[in-house]
Amino acid sequence: MDQFKGQPRLPKFAVPKRYDIKLKPDLVAHRFEGSVAVNLHVVAATSFIVLNAAELSVCNDAVSFTIQDSSKVLKPSRVELFENDEILVLEFPEKIPIGLGVLAIRFEGILNDRMKGFYRSTYEYNGEKKTMAVTQFEPADARRCFPCWDEPACKATFKITLDVPSELVALSNMPIVDEKIDGNLKTVSYQESPIMSTYLVAVVVGLFDYVENHTSDGVKVRVYCQVGKANQGRFALDVAVRTLELYKDYFETPYTLPKLDMIAIPDFAAGAMENYGLVTYRETALLYDDQHSAAANKQRVATVVAHELAHQWFGNLVTMEWWTHLWLNEGFATWVSYLATDSLFPEWKIWSQFLHESTEGLRLDGLAESHPIEVEINHACEIDEIFDAISYRKGASVIRMLQSYLGAECFQRSLASYIKRHACSNAKTEDLWAALEEGSGEPVNKLMTSWTKQKGYPVVSVKVNDQKLEFNQSQFLSSGAQGEGHWIVPVTLCFGSYDVHKNYLLQTNSETHNVKEFIGSTDNGVDCWIKLNVDQAGFYRVKYDELLASRLRYAVEKQLLSASDRFGVLDDSYALCMARQESLSSLINLMGSYREEVDYTVLSNLITISLKVGRIAADAVPDLLDYFKQFFINLFQYSAERLGWDSKPGESHLDAMLRGEILTALAVFGHDLTLDEASKRFQAFLEDRNTPLLPPDIRKATYVAVMHRASKSNRVGYDSLLKVYRETDLSQEKTRILGSLASSRDPDLILEALNFMLSSEVRSQDAVFGLGVTREGRDVAWSWLKENWEHLTKTYGSGFLITRFVSAVVSPFASFEKAKEVEEFFATHAMPSIARTLRQSLERVNINANWVQSVQKEDKLADAVKELAYRKY
C-alpha cells in the first residue's frame, strides 16, 4: 500500500463515470452519514483501488466492488485511510479485471466548523440560533464529504439524494425530481448532473427565503438568503439574469443547466464559489440593501456575480486539467467579469478600475518570491496558496494585454471556438493558445509562454537619443535587484497626442527605433510628450529618462493624458521609487501634479501610495512626518472640497465611492476639520440610525475618524462602534466596523480590538478585516499573532485565511532586525500552507527596510516636502 503515499496525483487504473451519493446530515450532533456508489471503468487490471478521502470513517465491511459483467461482488481484504495523503486505499484479494463495475462505500463524517468540505454555519431565526449545512469543495475538499476521485480531470455525472429535516430547504446543483416526507424527515432526490468535476458539487441545507426570475430562454434563476432578507437579493438577481444572457452571446454557447441558484452563506471563507448551478457567496458579495449598502458594495456584488457566472462556462463547462492551470479559471473569470459589468453599468467606467487588479498583480509579481502563472502543484496543501493575485490579477491582466494585441472581435471568436471544442472536458493553457493562434494567425503560444511560464515582468526603459528611441528591458524587482527574465513585450506608444501612435513587439533586450517622423520639429516643446504602454494595457512598467519624465509630469498637470495613463505614470514612478531607482523627492513632486485630479481610479491609487509613503517617511525621517501629512492633506483638499460630505443629486457612482475614500485618507492623516465633522455626524447617527447625515458611503470614513481619536482613556468612540456592530444584522455594516476598529493610535486599544476579532462575536471568516492596524499598532499586532498562533492554526490551519494573518501582520514592518525576529519565530512554528506567504512577507519587510535606508540618505528631501507642504495654490 505504501507505494501510493506521497504522490501528487491518484493512480490512473480506474476512472469514475458516475456517482450516486446519499447524505444524511445531523444538524444537532454536527455529524453526517452517507453512502456512495461509483460506476468505474477499470482500465488496467488491479488489486488496488485508490481514491481520495479525508476526515471520514470507513469500515472494512462497508466497502464492496461489483463486477458488472459477472455481477460478482468483491470485498476488500484491507481498507486504509492515509490522512497525510488524504487517500483511501482498498486492497482486494484478487485482481479486478479490465471493464466496468460499481464501487460502493458507506461512511461517516463530522459537519466541521472550518468552512471547508461539508461544514456547518450558524444563523438566527426568530431570535433562536440555528445551524445550516453547507459544502465548500474547491480546491480539494469534496474528499471530506464523500470518498471520490477529487481531481479536476476526473469528471463524472452526479446523482444526489439527501435525508434532511422536513421543514428545511435542501438545495443541490440540479433541480429536485422527487421529495418524500416521512414524519420529521424528508428524502430529496435531484436530477442527475451533466459531467463535471468533484470540486463543483454542492449541497446546502437550512431555512431560506428566495426571489426568482427567468432568462429569456427559460433558465430559472433564484437568489436565496436568510429569512427576512429576500429583498436584499433583488439587485444580484437582476445582474445574474442579464449576465447569463450576455455570456450566452459572448461564448456562443447557452448556459447548460435548467436552473441557477445563488445563495448567501453567513460563514464563508472565500468571496464566493462557482458550484455548477448552485453558487455560494458571502453575504457581503451577494446582498445589497438600498438603505445601508455603499456604492462600493453594489459594485462588489455586480463584479462577484459576473465572475462566478463566467465560471459556469470557464471552469465548469471547460475545466482546467490540473491546478497548474488554475489561472485559466480565475484569470479569465476576473477579466470577463469586467467585460460583463462594463456592459451592464457603463457609467461605472469599470475598465479604468481594472487597473486596481493589474496593480495588485504587479505588486505581488515584483517579488523574487512570486511564482509563474502556471505553477507546479505537488500536494493538495499547496493549492490554497495560489488562489492569489498572480492567478487572478496577473492572469486577468495578461488576458487583457493579449486581447488588446489581437483585437476584441478576433479574441471573442477564438474564445467561443475554444469553449465549443473543450465543452464537458478539460483543457490546458496550451489549448487556449492554440485556439487563439488559429483564430488570429498570430504566434500566440510563443508570445504568451514568456508571460505564463516564468515569474515576474519587465521594466522597459526608454530614452531619446538623436531622434531615435532607445528601449531596454530587464526584469523588474521591487527589491531593486537584477532579475534574469526576458519577455516578448507588446510595446505601444503615443507621441504628444493619442492620434499619433505606434506599436512594436520588443523581442530582444535592447532595440532602437527611428521616430523622426513622430518627433519632428517639436523636439524641444514640452507638449512633445511620449507615453509608453498606452492606457496601461500591457503588464509591465516603464522607466523614462529625465527629459521624457519631466514632459510627462507637465502632461499630467495639464490633463493631456487619459485617466489610465495618468494612473500608469504615477504607479510606475512609485514602484521605481520603492525599488530605489528613483528618489522619493522626485516621486512626491510628481504626486503634487495630481492635486486637481478628478478621476476615481487615479485618486484611489494616489491615496494608497500616499498612505504607504507616509509609513515609510515615519520610519525613515520621523522629524519630517508632519510635513508629509500636511502635503497629503493639501493634495486631497481640492477633491474634498469638490465632493463635500453630502451627496449631490444625480452624482455619479464613482464620486459616491471617491467621497468615502478621500475622507478616510484625510482622517488617517489627522486632518482636524475632517475629524471634527466625523465626530458630529457619528453622534447624530448614534441618536438616530436613519439620519441622513451618515449615509453608507461615508460610514467607513467616519468610523476610521472616530477611532483615530479613541484611546484606552478616551474609549467612548470604540465602545459606541461595538454597540453599532452588535445591533446590526447587515454583514456589510459589520465588516465596515471591523475594518475600522484597529485605526486607533493607542497600542492598548488596538490590542483590545485584535482580541475582539477572535471573540465569538466575530465570525471566523471576518477576523481578517480587523488586521489593518496603524503604524503604532505594528508591534502589538506581532506579539498578539505570536501569542495566539496555536489558536489561529487550530481555527484556520487548513485553509487560505491563515495566510492573510501572516501577510497583514508581518508585511508592514521596515527593519532587518524585525525580519530576523519573524524568521526565528516561524522556524519553530512552520506550516507548509503558509510557506510561500511567509517568504513573500519577509521579502516585503526587507524591501521596506532598504527603502527606509535609501530615503534617509536623500539630501533634497526635506526641502522638497516642506515646499510641497506649504505650497499655495
Image (tube, rainbow, N blue to C red):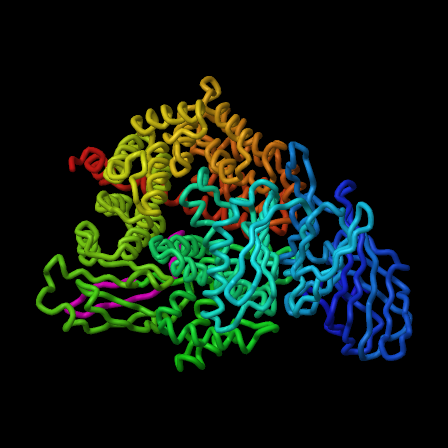
Residue 79 x/y as whole percent: 85, 61
Q: In this rendering, would 81 be left or right of 720?
A: right
Name the residue nearer the viewer: 823 or 597.
597
User: Is the N terminus in the top left, top right, bottom left or bottom right quadrant?
Assistant: bottom right
Residue 341 x/y as whole percent: 42, 57
Q: How many marks?
A: 0
Name the residue nearer the viewer: 89 or 317.
317
Q: Residue at x 13, y 57 (%)?
A: 526
Q: Residue at x 17, y 62 (%)?
A: 496
Residue 225 visible to the viewer: yes
Residue 53 visible to the viewer: no
User: Is the C terminus in the top left, top right, bottom left or bottom right quadrant?
Assistant: top left
In the rendered image of this protein, does residue 310 appear above or below residue 746?
below
Q: Which residues are magenta?
A: 461-480
Residue 702 x/y as whole percent: 39, 31
Q: In this rendering, would 561 be left or right of 383?
A: left
In the rendered structure, does residue 301 fall within the stretch colored magenta? no
In the rendered structure, does residue 479 fall within the stretch colored magenta? yes
Q: Identify the image quadrant of residue 402.
A: bottom left
Name the residue nearer the viewer: 368 or 425.
425
Q: Identify the image quadrant of residue 788.
A: top right
